[in-house]
Image (cartoon, rainbow, N blue to C red):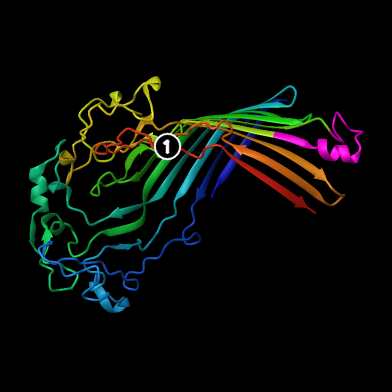
């Protein structure tokens, strides 16, 4: 994990800093679920063997053929026939993150400090689960509307050629299933394949007043962009789809401060107070934090959209919990006309279309009691989201839903917390 850094002092109050480093994600040290194919067995409910014409399972007897026992290694190549399986690659590779930065720090009068930096990173070999058992792309529709002819072609049922080789196979199966590379299985998933990647660029700035005269203050702002390729838009795609990251927050502003009230022993006022008075009135401290940040980007899934994507976003003054974006911009909302058995081309997310931003004001009051030389008690009264600002959840982005475009939830409202701590 090579890393290096440098610092150069331009003059007494100004320093330039830069650095680069590589950080690896461990494999095997952190918890990874094992794949116990053959030694862990689930029995699916096979309600019908003739596509619902007759039923062999009931609620009283959902497993008329009994439970499937785990065979261990005895099953050989027949292990988990007709079911989904997953596996790890024989040789797994460690994901790694490259980080770099370049910044300028300058000390201002009266204990103030300003810091402006460019920070970047790139993550390589991120884990992506890939399904190898899919209907080949050549048979899927590439039309921008519901292709009923292709749907009928792929969903047509035929006698199952595997019936009789294992009790789990039904009498019929679809053409889409028979065209898959491994039709005798369900999903065949490569777990944690190291094909994903992401990158991040940010301008990070900070203004700090170092603790002196009983108070400190910090103001930080980040203007950033995070991109990622950790999702396959289609199972047949050779590489993950590059998109704005789900956790991207373009703007983030944080202010925080601590102020020790100047009353009590050892402070500017009341240094001569008697112990009972100092016990009640001295040693108080006020803390505050304000957080503001952009909302996450929105995505709509595999949908039909016939319009201009620029028309989806509404002006800020026109948004409401009942209509967060323009639901009439060109979305096909008919359930009977939605896509199926197609190659998806609609973007995963939109960087310019986002949920509500977050705004929080948190405050606390702290009182320290010096009981004896070795015993000390602290009282804390804290309020979170003090102004009870409604931080809205993401809107509904399913075009066929009656709540499409609506926001039906919010984050935690204002809350209070009290604590009493004794240290000795």
- Residue at x 51%, y 61% (from the top left corner): 29
Q: Quadrant of residue 361?
A: top right
Decide if residue 264 is on the left or right side of residue 182.
right
**Residue 270 is a magenta residue:** yes
Residue occupied by mark 1: 393
- Residue at x 53%, y 50% (from the top left corner): 1
- Residue at x 51%, y 46% (from the top left corner): 22
Decide if residue 266 is on the left or right side of residue 125.
right
Q: Quadrant of residue 77?
A: bottom left
**Residue 216 is a magenta residue:** no
Which span of residues is magenta-colored? 264-286
Residue 184, x across and y down, in percent: 18, 65
Q: Is residue 229 above or below residue 249?
A: below
Count the marks: how many? 1
Residue 5, x across and y down, in percent: 60, 39
The residue lying toward the viewer, choosing from 297 and 44, is 44
Q: Residues within 10 Å of mark 1 (few under 14, many from 20)?
A: some
Residue 48, x across and y down, in percent: 15, 66
Decide if residue 354 is on the left or right side of residue 156.
right
Residue 321, x across and y down, in percent: 38, 30
């Amino acid at each position: 994990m090579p890393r290096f850094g440098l610092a150069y002092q331009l003059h007494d109050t100004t320093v330039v800093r830069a650095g680069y480093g590589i950080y690896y994600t461990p494999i095997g040290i952190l918890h990874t679920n094992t794949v116990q194919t053959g030694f862990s067995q689930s029995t699916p409910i096979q309600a019908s063997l003739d596509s619902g014409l007759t039923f062999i399972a009931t609620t009283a007897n959902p497993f008329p053929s009994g439970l499937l026992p785990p065979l261990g290694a005895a099953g050989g190549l027949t292990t988990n026939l007709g079911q989904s399986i997953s596996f790890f690659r024989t040789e797994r590779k460690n994901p790694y993150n490259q980080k770099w930065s370049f910044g300028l720090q300058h000390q201002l009068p009266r204990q103030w400090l300003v810091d402006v930096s460019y920070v970047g990173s790139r993550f390589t070999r991120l884990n992506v689960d890939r399904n190898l058992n899919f209907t080949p792309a050549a048979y899927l529709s590439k039309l921008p509307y519901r292709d009923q002819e292709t749907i009928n072609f792929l969903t047509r049922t035929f006698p199952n050629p595997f019936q009789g080789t294992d009790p789990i196979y039904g009498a019929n199966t679809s053409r889409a299933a028979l065209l898959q590379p491994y039709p005798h299985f369900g999903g065949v998933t490569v777990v944690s394949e190291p094909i994903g990647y992401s990158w991040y660029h940010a301008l990070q700035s900070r203004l700090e007043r170092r603790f002196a005269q009983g108070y400190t203050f910090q103001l930080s702002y980040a203007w950033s962009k995070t991109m990622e390729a950790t999702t396959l838009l289609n199972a047949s795609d050779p590489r993950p789809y590059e998109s704005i990251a789900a956790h991207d927050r373009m703007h983030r502003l944080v202010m925080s401060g601590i102020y020790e009230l100047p009353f009590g022993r050892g402070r500017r006022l009341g240094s001569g107070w008697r112990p009972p008075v100092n016990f009640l009135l001295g040693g108080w401290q006020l803390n505050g934090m304000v957080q503001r940040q952009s909302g996450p980007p929105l995505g709509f899934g595999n949908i039909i959209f016939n319009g201009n994507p620029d028309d989806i976003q509404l002006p800020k003054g026109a948004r409401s919990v009942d209509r967060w974006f323009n639901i009439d911009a060109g979305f096909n909302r008919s359930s009977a006309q939605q896509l199926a058995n197609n190659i998806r081309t609609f973007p995963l997310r939109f960087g310019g279309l986002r949920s509500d931003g977050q705004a929080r004001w948190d405050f606390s009051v702290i009182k320290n009691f010096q009981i004896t030389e070795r015993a000390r008690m602290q009282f804390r009264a804290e309020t979170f989201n003090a102004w009870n600002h409604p931080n809205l959840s993401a809107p509904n982005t399913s075009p066929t839903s009656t709540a499409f475009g609506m926001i039906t939830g919010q984050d935690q409202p204002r809350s209070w917390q009290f604590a009493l701590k004794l240290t000795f």
